């Protein structure tokens, strides 16, 4: 081997060392004892207090340290517990180079083997002759070090919003490849905490890179030059520095040394709030001010002659067509021998938002359970029973819904014709909601708004099952609304018949902005209510919506223009409403007044509540 011939401190002692030569030390570097002397380590507090000296003098300090510290003659390692002239590593290297094995090393390894064998209760084969632990040759250690760079690393992250760890968000553990770039490490950590962050109150947007930072434990900044390094590169970079302790995990964590790192993830909440606030108008649009806006006037005041003059700039226009075709529901079935036929809601070509029901007489076989699903009181519908439904030759699982209550109690019978009519309207509501959903996403895309929460609209269709009323010979069909079965039956409510959720998480604000968009897009001809959904494969899926329309005849729960007015009154604009450029509530009220006036001029009843006269 090549021995070092440069004394501690350099040939000219430019580094002020002890000038001793340590064959296994790096040329020109100070030995550990000199480093500790210069750093002021190992000073006796009592001795210092007695002397009144902080040992700033190298000579005085050296005299004291030389009595308490011993140095390895091979590499310059220094410590108070060293018993021999050389450290264990230098002794083992000497033995390896000389081709001998130290008896003390052999005895120590044998003792460890016997202890391990006793603890496991069975013999360990061929362990004594294996080169394990500290006796592994240098070449093998270098090979293991190289191989470890290709392995996985355990990264433990503690989130912070202040000085203390954030217990609400909780620590997270990541298993990442050693070659993962540090920029990607931060992205994965941000992605993990963004899901939790946006589910919290007043957090509608994802965190951005400048609003959070990755640091070592103790709020120690990571060197900027490491941003282009990998996990393994970061660890290797710090291992060659005096502050290498920042990448060495605490032994209490019981994580593997050399393939584990601990970080603190700091969120700069002030920057985040400033960004969110900058995207919201002052006044009733600011979700952080907590100020309350004034409620709008009633429909009667809006429609009165004393209302304010409304210019073209303060009202909305829309190409939305509110008329539907329910004729297929009132026609008699063409055959009574089918098991079931299918009805779907299809868009009318060349008409904005208009749908018609189309019937497919193809016979199909299905199986509906005789008893409805047992759901919790919170998740149970107030008007429909839900049954499990299976179609032969179809792997998809479905649920079948049938109306049992029109608001008059379960004891009041719902005839097949009324059930069929109302379910047809519910199917159109669902189809139209999907139509608005596509337009909503298009608007967000055009506005460059990629911050919206992810959600979906449920698919749906109807089936007709023959039934016979023998009393009067009249024949009709039982109808069911069919939807795909979701992975959970837990229902999340975002709006009620009139009111809306006051939660300020990202998903809730997105769906409330979606309802605002519908009123904006239809110039207040229509407003959705009872927006609810459940998670399916990790994605919120909306189903069973209700609507308020000017005529008040879109189905159960339609409270006419009053329902639209109350929906506007209860809506509180949020960050997404502003980012999408949606109209203010004042413009919505003005537009609703225009729609009411137009309906009255056409002889329509704009204040009809309920589900329409043709449903009675």
Image (cartoon, rainbow, N blue to C red):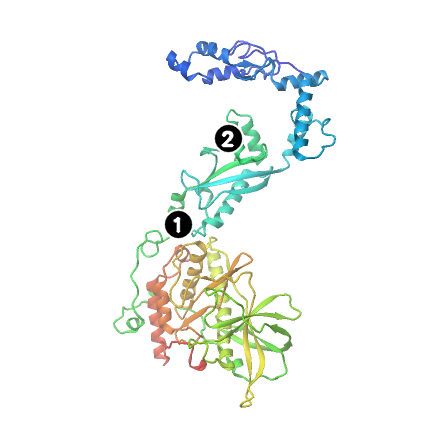
x 45%, y 33%: residue = 218
Question: Is residue 135 at least partly visible in the picture?
Answer: no
Identify the element where label 1 is drawn. Answer: helix
* Labelled disc at residue 276: 1
Q: Are marks 2 and 1 in contact (CB under 8 Å)?
A: no
* Labelled disc at residue 246: 2
| Residue 243 in picture, x, y percent from top left | 50, 26
x 47%, y 65%: residue = 436
Q: Quadrant of residue 255?
A: top right
* Labelled disc at residue 332: none
Judge the density around disc 1: few (<14), some (14-19), many (≥20) Cα neighbours within 10 Å. Answer: some
| Residue 488 in picture, x, y percent from top left | 53, 61
Question: Is residue 246 at least partly visible in the picture?
Answer: yes
Q: Nearer the viewer, mark 2 or mark 1?
A: 2
Which of disc 1 and disc 2 is earlier in sequence? Answer: 2
Q: Quadrant of residue 388?
A: bottom right
| Residue 37 in picture, x, y percent from top left | 48, 15
Q: Work out whether 450 lies above or below 88.
A: below
| Quadrant the C terminus occupies | bottom left
Q: Nearer the viewer, residue 145 or 87?
A: 87
Q: How many marks?
A: 2
Identify the element where label 2 is drawn. Answer: helix
| Residue 78 in picture, x, y percent from top left | 54, 16
Q: Nearer the viewer, residue 500 or 228?
A: 500
x 42%, y 60%: residue = 512
Judge the density around disc 2: few (<14), some (14-19), many (≥20) Cα neighbours within 10 Å. Answer: many
| Quadrant the N terminus occupies | top right
x 45%, y 49%: residue = 197
Q: Nearer the viewer, residue 409 or 155?
A: 409
């Amino acid at each position: 081997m090549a021995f070092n011939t440069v004394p501690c401190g350099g040939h000219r002692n430019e580094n002020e060392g002890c000038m001793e030569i340590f064959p296994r030390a790096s040329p020109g570097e100070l030995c550990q004892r000199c480093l500790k002397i210069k750093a002021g380590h190992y000073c006796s507090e009592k001795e210092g207090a007695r002397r009144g000296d902080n040992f700033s003098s190298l000579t005085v300090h050296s005299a004291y340290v030389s009595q308490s510290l011993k140095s390895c003659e091979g590499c310059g390692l220094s410590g108070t517990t060293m018993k021999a002239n050389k450290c264990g590593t230098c002794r083992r290297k000497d033995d390896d180079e000389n081709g001998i094995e130290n008896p003390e090393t052999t005895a120590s390894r044998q003792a460890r083997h016997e202890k391990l064998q006793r603890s496991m209760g069975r013999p360990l084969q061929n362990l004594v002759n294996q080169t394990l632990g500290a006796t592994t040759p240098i070449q093998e250690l270098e090979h293991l070090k190289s191989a470890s760079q290709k392995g996985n690393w355990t990264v433990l992250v503690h989130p912070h919003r202040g000085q203390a760890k954030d217990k609400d968000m909780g620590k997270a553990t990541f298993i990442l490849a050693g070659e993962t770039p540090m920029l990607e490490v931060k992205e994965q950590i941000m992605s993990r905490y963004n899901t939790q962050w946006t589910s919290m109150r007043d957090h509608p947007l994802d965190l951005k890179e400048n609003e959070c930072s990755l640091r070592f434990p103790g709020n120690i900044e990571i060197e900027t030059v490491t941003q282009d390094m990998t996990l393994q590169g970061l660890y290797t970079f710090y291992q060659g520095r005096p502050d290498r302790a920042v990448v060495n995990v605490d032994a209490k964590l019981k994580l593997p040394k050399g393939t584990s790192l601990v970080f603190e993830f700091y969120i700069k909440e002030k920057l985040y709030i400033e960004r969110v606030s900058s995207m919201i108008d002052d006044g009733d649009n600011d979700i952080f001010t907590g100020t309350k806006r004034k409620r709008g006037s009633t429909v009667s005041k809006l429609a009165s002659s004393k209302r304010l003059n409304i210019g073209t700039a303060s009202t909305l226009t829309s190409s939305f067509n509110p008329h539907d075709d329910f004729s297929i529901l009132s026609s008699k079935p063409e055959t009574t021998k089918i098991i079931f036929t299918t009805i779907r809601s299809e868009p009318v070509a060349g008409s904005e938002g208009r749908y018609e029901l189309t019937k497919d007489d193809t016979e199909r076989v299905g199986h509906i359970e005789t008893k409805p699903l047992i759901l919790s009181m919170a998740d149970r519908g107030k008007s429909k029973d839900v049954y499990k439904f299976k179609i032969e030759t179809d792997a998809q699982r479905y649920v079948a819904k049938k109306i049992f209550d029109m608001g008059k109690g379960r004891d009041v019978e719902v005839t097949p014709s009324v059930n069929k009519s109302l379910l047809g309207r519910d199917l159109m509501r669902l189809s139209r909601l999907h139509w608005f959903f596509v337009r909503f996403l298009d608007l967000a895309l055009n506005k460059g708004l990629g911050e919206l929460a992810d959600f979906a609209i449920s698919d749906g269709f109807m089936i007709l099952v023959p039934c016979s009323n023998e009393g009067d010979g009249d024949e009709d069909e039982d109808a069911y609304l069919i939807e795909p079965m979701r992975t959970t039956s837990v229902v999340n409510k975002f709006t009620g018949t009139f009111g809306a959720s006051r939660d300020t998480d990202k998903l809730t604000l997105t769906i409330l902005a979606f309802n605002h968009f519908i009123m904006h897009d239809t110039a207040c001809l229509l407003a959705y209510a009872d927006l609810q959904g459940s998670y399916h494969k990790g994605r919120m899926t909306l189903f069973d919506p209700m609507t308020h329309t000017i005529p008040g005849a879109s189905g159960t729960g339609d409270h006419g223009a009053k329902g639209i007015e109350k929906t506007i009154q209860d809506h509180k604009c949020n960050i997404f409403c502003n980012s999408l450029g949606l109209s203010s509530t004042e413009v919505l009220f003005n537009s609703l007044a225009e729609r009411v006036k137009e309906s009255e001029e056409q002889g329509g009843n704009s204040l009809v509540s309920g589900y329409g006269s043709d449903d009675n």
